Amino acid sequence: MNDSTRSRAAILVVDDEPVVLAAVARDLRRGFGERYRVVRAGSGQEALEALRELVRRGEQVALLIADQRMPGLSGTDYLVRAREVAPTAKRVLLTAYADTEAAIQAINEVSLDYYLLKPWDPPEEELFPVVEDLLTGWEAGAALESGGARLIGHRFSRESHELRDFLARNRVPGRWLDIERDGEARQLLRVAGVDGERLPVALLEDGTVLERPTVLELAERLGVVGQPASQHYDLVIVGGGPAGLAAAVYGASEGLKTIMVEREAPGGQAGQSSRIENYLGFPAGLSGSDLARRATDQARRLGAELLTLQDTTGLRVAGSGRVVELSGGETLSASSVLVASGVSYRQLDVPGFAALTGSGIYYGAALTEARSCAQQRVVVIGGANSAGQAAVYFSSYAARVTMLVRGDSLAKSMSRYLIEQIESLPNVEVRTRTQAVGAEGDGRLRALRIQPAHGADTVEEVDACFVFIGALPRTDWLAGVVARDERGFILAGLDARRDGWPLARDPFPLETSVPGVFVAGDVRARSIKRVASAVGEGSMAVSLVHQYLAEA
């Protein structure tokens, strides 16, 4: 085997019917043979042995394709076991029409990425687009794990967590090295001549060593923070969640000079979701990170500008123009503005939580911490979908996941499909009518004080805690300019007339009390807190912007 062959990642195909196996291997080589090596196996057991051998040799495995009806080891059972050997490989099940129920069941059991019905003729329409999409997703994840910056620090350091989260959410290639667990981390510090007291440390590809960098300093050195290319835009979008990204896609595609400003990372709060399973068109679900990556690439391809790690600090009306003020001191002039700044998780105001935030206590899913939670005790606080998705995700790593829910049932706030998944997981425990009333630690979280509705408080050892207890709108920067309700959510449509609407016409459905300033997504008063509705509002807002600009 020559070096060029070994350097290509593998696609492993298994089918007990030689004719079918030969056909799928032939089509895969024709479509992807220049980029990937296709490996064949005639049974599930043979495929497992081939997979273990690939991993032993240090080769990457991108895609596993398995027939469902195989004697001895079915496709689903094989993929369950294969997931333990190659957890990052994408998984596809080959099924006949009569096996679709098994395929749908496998979506939940093995996190199946797709199922293909036989025959897949013509492959250019039925096979190649599916495989290309899966491989693109795998390549994006593999790129993040190889090369790039190396970040060295303590796992339970707030500063280290913020830098890790920044790299992951902005999809910057890089590796995390725990100073306490990784010998390589200590060796790199010695080579770089850095004192272990100066952590976290970032080692960049150009040889630069950054000691205790802030997120902004690291972002600037990595070229993540950009500058606007123009003085004036047709549309400035504030916020890069699903609503903002949808508006960027539609605005740019429809000829508007569009720029999107995001304070943290594309995807917003939804980008932190481990799995969105009820989004139309994705039967196997998709992660928030994957949705953000797809939408970001799409917006950029269509011509939208994206500014990340830029916060908005104010909005001014200047005649027919609208001026958005940025935290760096710059301003963006616009003919119209869409506020899609979203919400942030509400902080839990009980003793110990503030001091330990980022050091074992996290708000939101904090997916960067998942692997570090292997065989540990994890607590998820909250009873809505975001909490349920996190519990399911962390159950794949943690020894035990405990959900603390203030209500008497999950049914009041969580989708049924999630409840069923949680009920099927042996290492997830749901405690209703229970809450955390304190956190204890010595620089990192060690225990939670837990209070049930009946009975005495208990102090329980915990390694990590993830909090999902409602949201607060990010609208303080609009105080005194745009009308908001008593909770800070932005009023729109006819609701916006009560604050001195200046025009003879009524406000458009998503227009705020300032003409030409629109709102979409979770930050809008009375909005439906769903990814699909946010995407719909973002695209709808662009249509309303066109109407406004035509009038103006």
Image (tube, rainbow, N blue to C red):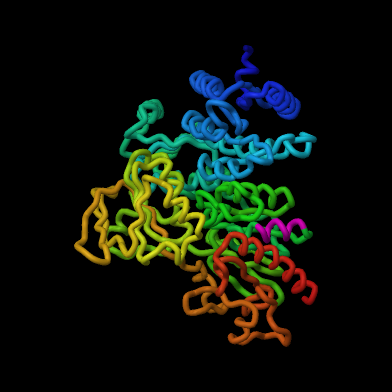
| Residue at left offset 64%, top offset 85% | 501
- Where, quadrant-wise, is the N terminus in this rendering? top right
Figure disc tally: 0
Magenta segment's dominant SS is: helix
Foreground of the two, 418 or 166: 418
Q: Which residues are magenta?
A: 246-253
Q: Quadrant of residue 357?
A: bottom left
Q: Quadrant of residue 63?
A: top right
| Residue at left offset 68%, top offset 37% | 96
Q: Evaluate whether residue 42 shows in this view.
A: yes
Q: Is residue 297 magenta?
A: no
Question: x and y percent of residue 519 in the render?
Answer: 62, 70
- Where, quadrant-wise, is the C terminus in this rendering? bottom right
Answer left or right for 483 relative to 511: left
Question: x and y percent of residue 347 in the render?
Answer: 38, 63
Question: x and y percent of residue 376 in the render?
Answer: 33, 42
Q: Is residue 118 above or below residue 165?
A: above
Taking the view exactly as shown, the residue that stands out farthest to the left is 456
Q: Evaluate whether residue 200 shows in this view.
A: no
Q: Is residue 81 above or below residue 213?
A: above
Question: x and y percent of residue 60 in the render?
Answer: 56, 26
| Residue at left offset 38%, top offset 40% | 372
